[in-house]
Amino acid sequence: GSSATGSGVAAGWTNDNSLAVLGQEAEAGPTVLVDPLGRCIVMHLHSGLLAVIPINRKYNPKSGSGAEAHYKDDSGAASTPPRRSSSPSQSCLGNLFHCRLEERVVLSMTFLQFASSDVLPHICILHQDARGVQHVTTHVLHLQKRQLYFSQSTTLPSGTSAEWLR
């Protein structure tokens, strides 16, 4: 898990169990998104960083290690069965990875919805620059390459703002 220090800088554990400083906590607070086609979960918890958890769409809870929701141990008490395998095909969630994000003050994010699952996940981000100007950017998330690619950007016309977010 992650813990915050008194200075607003967040730290967390990496995959190799070493403590890492992940950066400033997200200025507008944490944001969690789930891809509408069920391919991944995206979290914006720290400024300049997205945490991505792929979802295994081939996961079948009725086969393999997920077959029994509960079982009784030797004492007869109900408990959850131990995980037998960490194989990606037997786990609902894949390994978390991080993507660098240029936008520092993220006001809101959403997945763009497409009818076809052949289209890579697109994330639309409303953010504010250091001058207070708001922009909308779109990024493409390539889960197999574990990369976030910039797609396009638009500046909101002067006089308009995202006041409705507050």
Image (cartoon, rainbow, N blue to C red):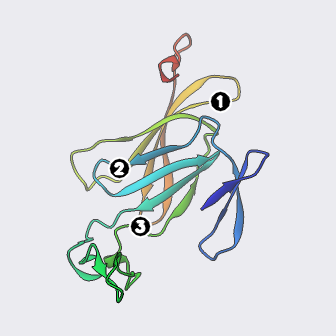
Which residue appears at 36% of the width and 63% of the height? Answer: 55
The crowd level at tag 2 (other Cα within 10 Å; few <14, some 14-19, many 20+) is some
Is 153 placed above or below 67 here?
A: above
Residue ID for mark 1:
129
Q: Which of marks 2 and 1 is nearer the N terminus?
A: 2
Tell me how far mark 3 sits from mark 1, CA to CA: 30 Å
Give the residue type at disc 3. Answer: Gln
How many marks can you see?
3
Q: Earlier in the sequence, mark 3 or mark 1?
A: 1
52 with respect to 70 (left or right): right
Give the foreground label among 2 and 3. 2
Identify the secondary structure beneath mark 2: loop
| Residue 93 numbered mark, or none | none
Residue ID for mark 3:
144
| Residue 35 numbered mark, or none | 2
72 with respect to 96 (left or right): left
Question: Residue 20, how many percent across, how many down?
Answer: 71, 64
